[in-house]
Amino acid sequence: MTDKIKKVVLAYSGGLDTSVILKWLIETYKCEVVTFSADLGQPDPMAYVEQNALRTGAKKAYVEDLKEEFVRDYVFPMFRANTIYEGEYLLGTSIARPLIAKRQMEIAKIEGADAVSHGATGKGNDQVRFELTYFSMDPQIKIVAPWREWDLTSRTALMEFAKKHGIRVPTTPSKPYSMDGNLLHISYEGGILEDPWAAPPDDIFQLTVSPQQAPDAPEIVEITFTQGNPTAVNGKELSPAKMLAELNRLGGKHGIGRVDLVENRFVGMKSRGVYETPGGTILRKAHMAMESITLDREVHHLRDSLIPKFASLIYNGFWFSPERRLLQNMIDDTQRNVSGVVRVKLYKGSVTVTGRKSEHSLYSEAHATFEGDAVYRQKDAEGFIRLNALRLRIQKLMNR
């Protein structure tokens, strides 16, 4: 196949894997390589990504700021469903891949490229996420996945390749774990983290302070929601990207959002990952509180029953699938009245809801009070209980 590819668009982060891949593609396929780097708010500076790509041999390098689109069209729709994978993972890496792959395919069309490439390994989920998006946009696209082809079987081998070819990369033998960051989170995998018994070293964390080192005084924050989306913090309206950045700042300051988990990958193996998601942790907790007073009970429970499926679709790379779109429409319909203000307390790694209010609130103090009331007849509960107990009583009678 090496003689059939003329131009490749590579999803290029500037890290170890994609830096080596850029050079490897040129040497192996004798083709032009155009790189695409998405600025999604990752902590690594993007200033030198274009320069490094061109220095390594790229014919052209795209670097685009997609932060607002990322949060508005991917993160917020996901959080309108309170999405969480296997009870802990807020899908920070998973939700970024469809946007990167979509824009990569758009650039491939602009450039007249006949192939695309990525740096995902043959063991992980990202290869699926990238390639499902590629095929959803062009069923005939050629895909080069170096990790499934080359003989560079470890990150140590990649570092040696980079050194041999004079490629500047951020990974060093002393910190060989893999990192992925954006405005929603940073993930850490591999290397010293592959032993699930070994605690992650505290110096790997970049977004959050240790809860033990967080301020001794709690901080009160008010978050305004409009139809399920956060729109203001402490009364100040913010764009989606600035909103998440501000929640990250607040959460990071108080040591919120650290997670250490072993998850089930789509390809079948278990994987240990360490994550920091400070703003997302605050957002999910506050959004759930907003829904608690604005959603009808049965609508709420039905929507919640869909969360595992919705999370799996995102985790497994099916963002652009018809079933994800169907679920999204249903979820978004539940959010029409999810508007109001939630008050939370941030303190040493915890987020505690201390208040919620909404013009669309379904909470009735007159009905819920433990004091005397004139709107609820307690005697009605007797018939309600007897009707619900009827099948249980019949079963017991028949057993006798």
Image (cartoon, helix red, strand yellow):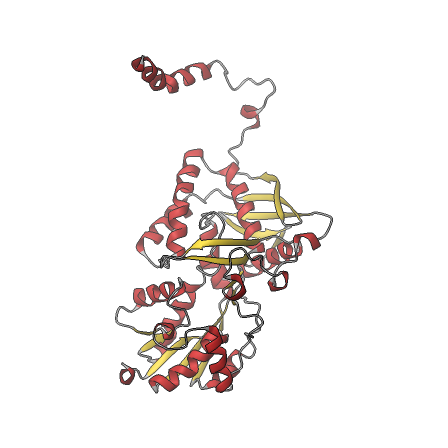
Q: How many marks?
A: 0
- The answer to whether residue 315 is above or below residue 152 is above
Percent of width and height locating residue 128: 36, 63
Residue 338 seen by the camera: yes
Q: In the depicted view, which residue is nearer to us: 262 or 384? A: 262
Percent of width and height locating residue 155: 47, 73
Which residue is depicted at the point 54% across and 67% down? Answer: 42
- The answer to whether residue 161 is above or below residue 206 is below
- Quadrant showing the N terminus: bottom left
Relative side of 48 to 333, left or right: right
- Quadrant showing the C terminus: top left
Asked where in the image residue 201 lies, by quadrant, the reply is: bottom right
Residue at the extreme right: 216
Asked where in the image residue 320 lies, by quadrant, the reply is: bottom left
- The answer to whether residue 30 is above or below residue 252 is below
Percent of width and height locating residue 220: 67, 47
Percent of width and height locating residue 132: 33, 63
Relative side of 139 to 368, left or right: left
Residue 77 seen by the camera: no
